[in-house]
Image (spheres, grey):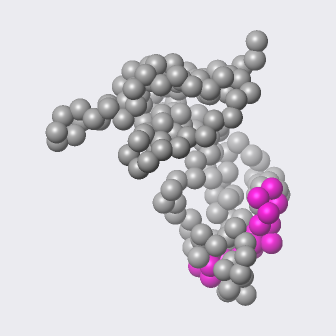
Amino acid sequence: METKLIELRGVSKAYDVAAGKFLALKDVDIIGAGEFVAVVGKSGSGKSTLINMITGIDSPTSGEIFVATTPVHNLDQEQLAVWRGRNVGVVFQFFQLLPTLTVSENIILPMDFCGVIPARERKERAFALLEKVGIVEQADKLLRIYRVDSLAGGDGARAGE
């Protein structure tokens, strides 16, 4: 039997708002082994809430969440912080990179915090990751020169050269 990478069982999330309870997710069951899933929907439909549940940023009101074999729903805040630092990468919709650091230094910074990758391997790993997404040529560029949203390439990324 294949291990499921992400599994949600009956996950619900309710928020307390001025008008009462707002149910953002209701009895969500998802993702078996080998499946690809796209999460789509209009604004306010629960996409971000779902991702926050899977990554342990927020906790479900009810239900169970497993990532690999980790029962994310049972971890306390300290355990979640350690688990996220070693296992999860999240790029937020409104992210903040440090403009005084280069592109590769911004990638290395989280490696410094979690301590999983030996210091001597971090720069090489950052360059390998940039190579995977096709922007290794931007590795040593300071972000303050560029609009961060133009790092994907094209003329906007080279405007500061």
The tally of labels here is 0
Q: Quadrant of residue 100?
A: bottom right
Left or right: residue 96 versus residue 34 is left
Q: Position of residue 18 (x, y in %)?
A: 17, 41
Q: Quadrant of residue 120?
A: bottom right
| Outermost residue to the top | 1
Residue 140 versus residue 48 in the image, above or below: below
| Residue at the spot 64% in from the left edge and 73% down from the top edge | 150
Q: Position of residue 94 (x, y in %)?
A: 48, 60
Q: Can I make out residue 94 in this image?
A: yes
| Outermost residue to the left | 19
Q: Position of residue 108 (x, y in %)?
A: 69, 58
Q: Is residue 135 magenta?
A: yes
| Residue at the spot 18% in from the left edge and 34% down from the top edge | 20
On-image quarter of the N terminus: top right
On-image quarter of the C terminus: bottom right
In the rendered structure, which segment of residues is drawn in magenta? 131-146
Residue 120 versus residue 96 in the image, above or below: above
Q: Position of residue 98 (x, y in %)?
A: 56, 68
| Residue at the spot 67% in from the left edge and 51% down from the top edge | 111
Q: Is residue 158 magenta?
A: no
Left or right: residue 159 versus residue 148 is right
Q: Quadrant of residue 24?
A: top left
Residue 153 versus residue 32 in the image, above or below: below
Residue 102 versus residue 93 in the image, above or below: below
| Residue at the spot 39% in from the left edge and 26% down from the top edge | 26
Q: Can I make out residue 120 in this image?
A: no
